[in-house]
Image: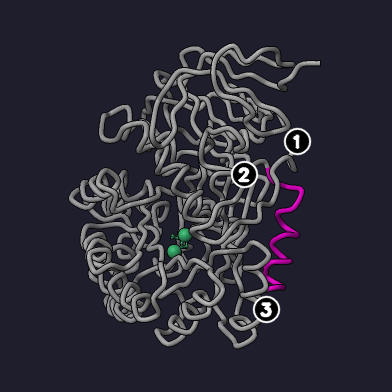
Amino acid sequence: MSALDTIVSGATICTDSETFQADIGIKDGRIAAIGHDLGDAAEVIDATGLLALPGGIDSHVHISQPGEPGVVMADDFETATRSAIFGGHTTLLPFCLQSKGQTLRDAVQWYHGLADGNCYTDVSFHLIITDPTPQALGQDLPALVADGYTSIKLFMTYEGMKLSDREILETLEAAKTCGALALVHAENDDMIEYLRDVAGDRGDIAPKFHATTRPIPAEREATHRAIALAEVIGVPIVVVHVSNRDAMEEIAAGRARGSKVYGETCPQYLMLTKDDLDLEGFDGAKYVCSPPPRDTASQIACWEGLQTGVFDIFSSDHCPYRFEDPQGKKRPAGLKSFRWVPNGIPGVETSLPILFSEGVSKGRIDLQRFVALSSTNHAKLYGLYPRKGTIAVGSDADIVLWDPARTETLRQDIMHHGADYTPYEGLDVVGWPTRTILRGKTIMRDGALLVEKGWGQYQKRALHGQELT
Ligand code: URP
Ligand code: ZN
Ligand code: ZN
């Protein structure tokens, strides 16, 4: 019998700290050896000319999330995780939404009912807290954190989801007590509601007004406030989907004061602008997401943030709605005004090819930074490292082989998501994931799906700052 199950031979291995040539030996789903002359294996994968990178981890994904009545997300766990593996991901961290009046435990149970047995990637939930009752904060959250649900998301905007400053303080205090890491959606809700009302009075209903009614100061102010609230309690936070330089400066200023503030940006802030919301007719609705895409100067700023470390992680904020669908972007209310258009765009399949092509292939970031932003830092932040997020002996054999020279054009007809469009239609990319390996098993090769759903497993996580072995 062979000592190893699989050898990935001849690849150029990249971690967040180095690039080197070696073979990877896999046994029982984990990396058992890295080196040369590893002996026999039942399967040898010739990866000559390819890069072997840690499987992508997307820590900001919305799947089957309940929203306004009559609105349905385009992806369930099967389609979202299927789409993800074609884009070079092996682990997703989707949100588990606590609806108002629901216990956190019930929300978690309900999401497991949707996810378990249906995933192609490994998954682990962040808990969205919308109803911070004494039971939620005092009993359910500590118990869930002890069970490996170690992160929460708090919203400062969106009716039905937003928390007051007081509720944020109370929730952060509870998070501090049990060690949960908080992600914050930072936009000033009153500014947005005021501007939306003014727009409504003027009859400004087109999708482009989504961008003008969620301006940069609304994001800057809320980012400042979120960091200040976290400073009062003395907890780290992650400011997610940052879109512009002002918000980045708030993160940098918080760090300069000694606060632990982490930053995330997303492909839409590198590749789209508010002009995309101003297309003919209703087409701009395809790009309605929050915060909205800004302008060229903000794109440049976000690239700088990826280079300098203002951003620790790069995520998709995959939040897909079908366009030609009365339960999606074209819901009847949405056709009447931008304010009722479902917020969010698909992106879990395109995010890493975009970061690789626009970042690595165009020389904006190096391979180490790509690996850090797309995998290692997510694992470290959210209690998955070193089980995931690296190529090292003992880690899960979550490996993506990238062909750095392969060119592709992003098009809806090559996507595997449930949406009926990609915001990046026609974008040429250089660099492409050709094989995705999850816990030692090839699940995608050259565009072919090679496993049944259910290979992806739920992952309990360690606390932020602790290792998962
Ligand atoms: O527009 C977006 N980003 N929708 C997803 C929900 C969120 O705020 O992350
Ligand atoms: Zn958000
Ligand atoms: Zn989101």
Mark 1: C-beta under 8 Å from nearest atom of ligand 3: no
Distance in Å between CA atoms under marks 2 and 3? 26 Å
Residue count near mark 2 (Cα–Cα under 10 Å), binned few <14, some 14–19, many ≥20: many
Disc 1: which residue: 452
Residue 168 higher or lower than 269, as above or below: below
Residue numbers of the magenta segment: 105-119
Task: Indicate the secondary structure of the residue bearing disc 3.
Answer: loop
Q: Residue at x 47, y 77 (%)?
A: 172
Sequence-earlier tag: 2 or 1: 2
Checking the image for residue 103, the label placed there is: 3
Q: Nearer the viewer, mark 2 or mark 3?
A: 3
Q: What amino acid type should be assigned to the residue bearing mark 3?
A: Thr
Residue 452 higher or lower than 265, as above or below: above
The reply, left or right, for residue 422 in relation to residue 62 is left
Residue 335 visible at all: no
Q: Which residue is outermost to the right?
A: 1
Q: Quadrant of residue 66?
A: bottom right
Sequence-earlier tag: 3 or 1: 3
Checking the image for residue 81, the label placed there is: 2
Task: Indicate the secondary structure of the residue bearing disc 1.
Answer: loop
Q: Which quarter of the rendered image does ligand 1 occupy?
A: bottom left
The reply, left or right, for residue 135 in relation to residue 243 is right
Task: Indicate the secondary structure of the residue bearing disc 2.
Answer: helix
Residues under numbered marks 2 and 3 in contact, where contact means CB atoms less than 8 Å apart: no
